[in-house]
Amino acid sequence: MSLFFKEYDTFIANLTLNTFSISINSVYCYTWDVVMDWGMAQQVAQPLCSVKSPGDTSCQSTILRARLRFGFPLSFGIMITNFILRFSWMLRFYHEQIFQSFDSFVLATQFLEVFRRALWNLLRVEWELIKNSPPLAKGKEFDPIVYNVEMGTTISPTNLNKA
């Protein structure tokens, strides 16, 4: 009987270690996504913002970044969804309770990963576009750049008529 409890204790210790390791990996990868891949939360050293008026965006630009193509609600929603889906791999410890078969578990987690990567790509492409575009004058809106392959020139909507 004591051999059973010893194996059970070893199983629980391994499960705890695996869960802890996957959690550390997920948090690290999420932090890398936000700071390095999306260019957000890079002004964290500044004091936390305080919203002075309903239209004040200083808090949004301190937490995320000053220029957001998709706006604060959608960008923040993508960040939260990415954080939750980063932990979807932990479902493998409970797949017998949640899914009818192992195949349905694999299919579900693969669909979740594809969805997470699609959302990740939205903010990644947005960040690359912002990073590689010229700085805007104060008060101007985001000016997407279009590359004209035939002419080999860069066209923005503000000088579209000149091309």
Image (cartoon, helix red, strand yellow):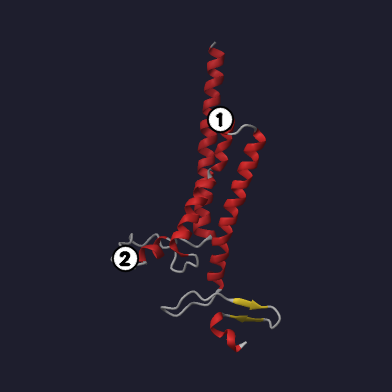
Relative height, residue 125 to residue 100 (above, below): below
Identity of the residue furthest to the right in this view: 150
* Residue 136, image x, y percentages: 47, 78
Of the residues shown, which amino acid type is indicated by label 2?
Answer: Pro
Q: Quadrant of residue 22?
A: top right
From the viewer's side, name the closer residue of 55 and 120. Answer: 55
Say whether marks 2 and 1 touch (CB < 8 Å).
no
Vertical position of residue 134 compared to residue 93: above or below? below
Structural crowding at the residue carrying mark 1, measured as other residues with C-alpha within 10 Å and reported as few (<14), some (14–19) or many (≥20): few
Residue corresponding to mark 2: 54
Camera-nearest residue between 8 and 90: 90
Is residue 45 left or right of 147 when viewed as pictured? Answer: left
Quarter of the image for the C terminus: give it: bottom right
In the image, what residue occupies the spot 52% across and 28% down? 13
**Percent x, y of residue 30:** 51, 51
Residue 96 quadrant: top right
Q: Counting other residues with Cα less than 10 Å from the Cα at mark 2, is it few (<14), some (14-19), or many (20 or more)?
A: few
On residue 97, the disc is 1
Q: Position of residue 144 (x, y in %)?
A: 55, 74
The residue sitting at the front extreme is 100
Amino acid at dot 1: Gln
Q: Residue furthest left?
A: 52
- Residue at 55 percent of width and 35 percent of height: 18
